[in-house]
Amino acid sequence: MEKRRLYMDYSATTPIKKEVLDAMMPYLTDYFGNASSFHTFGREAKDALDKAREQVAALINAEPSEIYFTAGGSESDNWTLEGVAYANKNKGNHIITSKIEHHAILHTCEYLAKHHGFEITYLDVDSEGKVDLKQLEESIKDTTILISIMFANNEIGTIQPIKEISEIAKKHKILFHTDAVQATGNIPVDVKELGIDLMSMSSHKIYGPKGVGALYIRKGVRLHNFVHGGAQEKSKRAGTENIPAIVGYGKAAELAKENMQNHVETLTRLRNKLIDGVLERIPYTRVNGSLENRLPGNANFAFQFIEGEGILLLLDMLGIAGSSGSACTSGSLDPSHVLLAIGLPHEIAHGSLRLTVGDFTTDDDIDYILENLPKVIERLRSMSPLYDDAKKQGLVK
């Protein structure tokens, strides 16, 4: 009997939708021109590039001229931080971010601090992963040139109060960037209404191809170029454009905009069914992140007395693909920096499991997980010295 294949890691990546692949294929075969060329082949590629830019802009209510295609969310994050830092060195050298950002933000901040003398303030978060707005305002200095706070967390799904953060930044005349890789295409995002200056996005999180993303740069915002050597992307990012991938990203953005309401409602229902079912069936379990301000597809659990790697291994043997917060950085045995930042002790943070639902998840899939996950946790706890000690101390039944 063939092992079941159940994908529950949509926050890591998503499968390409058929409509996206169909849109891409002609640009891998017939319409292969270079968008910088002046002949017919080049114009065909340039027209496709322009259309995709319009589709991505429409998803976030931006102008097409404010969309710059990149290789993905990590590049967009790097470009923002370094581009703003270098363009505003005469104004200041202070950047504010949070302790739960993606490593594309955290590591770039570390680089700027170590090699270019920038001062970085890392904001605390509460037990749900929400930034402290009072601390944000108190952290602002005359030398602050950028505030970068992620829109929604990739591990625990918490959605930040983006409009309030933007208003604080505007009041102090500071640029505001948000890493919205997990948000755009999964929840409504309106850059004009929210007052966002710069925003990172990615294709493969919304059923598009890998290797392509975008940076929204509000008109009038100045930042240094990131890649040199050509006139592509209005001379801000050199290199021949990956037209097939960009076309796919545009189509994925168009589908996301069209299906947004149904997407949010369906994923929220499935997520709630999963969370409620797990909490009902498995004792000594907590949900990490906000239950109210949360990405519709995200469920993140901490199971006491066991480690996340064991959970993943046994789930994989059952055909279920999830992820663990204790392997946030490949090869690391340390717990997730996000889970530690929200106040989880190391021993509980090690027992985390993220399951994220998507457009291809069914009720039957959730039922299969709710049937098998309790058995996995029970088996691991039966082998756990921590669980045995807790029973001896009367801490568990």
Image (spheres, grey):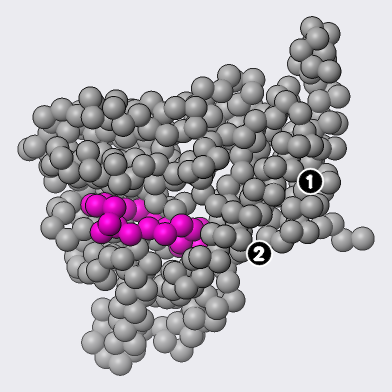
Is 388 drawn above or below residue 202 in the view shown?
A: above
Q: Which residues are magenta?
A: 184-206
Determine the residue positioned at 14% across, 46% down.
Answer: 87
Q: CA distance from mark 2 to mark 1?
A: 18 Å
Q: Quadrant of the C terminus?
A: top right
Q: Quadrant of residue 111?
A: top left
Residue nearer the viewer, 260 or 342: 260
Is 162 drawn above or below residue 183 in the view shown?
A: above
Residue 367 point in image, percent of width and height? 79, 52
Q: Is residue 83 visible?
A: yes
Q: Is residue 104 visible?
A: no
Q: Earlier in the sequence, mark 2 or mark 1?
A: 2
Residue 330 counted in the magenta span? no
Q: Is residue 85 left or right of residue 310?
A: left
Identity, as a three-letter code, of the amino acid under mark 1:
Leu
Determine the residue positioned at 46% across, 61% down.
Answer: 185
Residue 191 counted in the magenta span? yes
Query: Is the residue marked by circle 1 packed among few (<14), some (14-19), or many (20+) residues within 10 Å?
Result: many
Q: Label 2, on which residue?
A: 360
Q: Residue furthest left?
A: 90
Q: Is residue 312 left or right of residue 261?
A: right
Is 109 drawn above or below residue 73 in the view shown?
A: above
Q: Is residue 151 left or right of residue 172?
A: right
Q: Label 1, on which residue?
A: 370
Determine the residue positioned at 20% across, 55% down.
Answer: 225
Are circles 2 and 1 on residues that touch, CB within 8 Å? no
Residue 351 point in image, percent of width and height? 67, 29
Residue nearer the viewer, 392 or 43: 392
Residue 84 point in image, percent of width and height? 20, 45
Q: Quadrant of the N terminus?
A: bottom right
Residue nearer the viewer, 111 or 293: 293
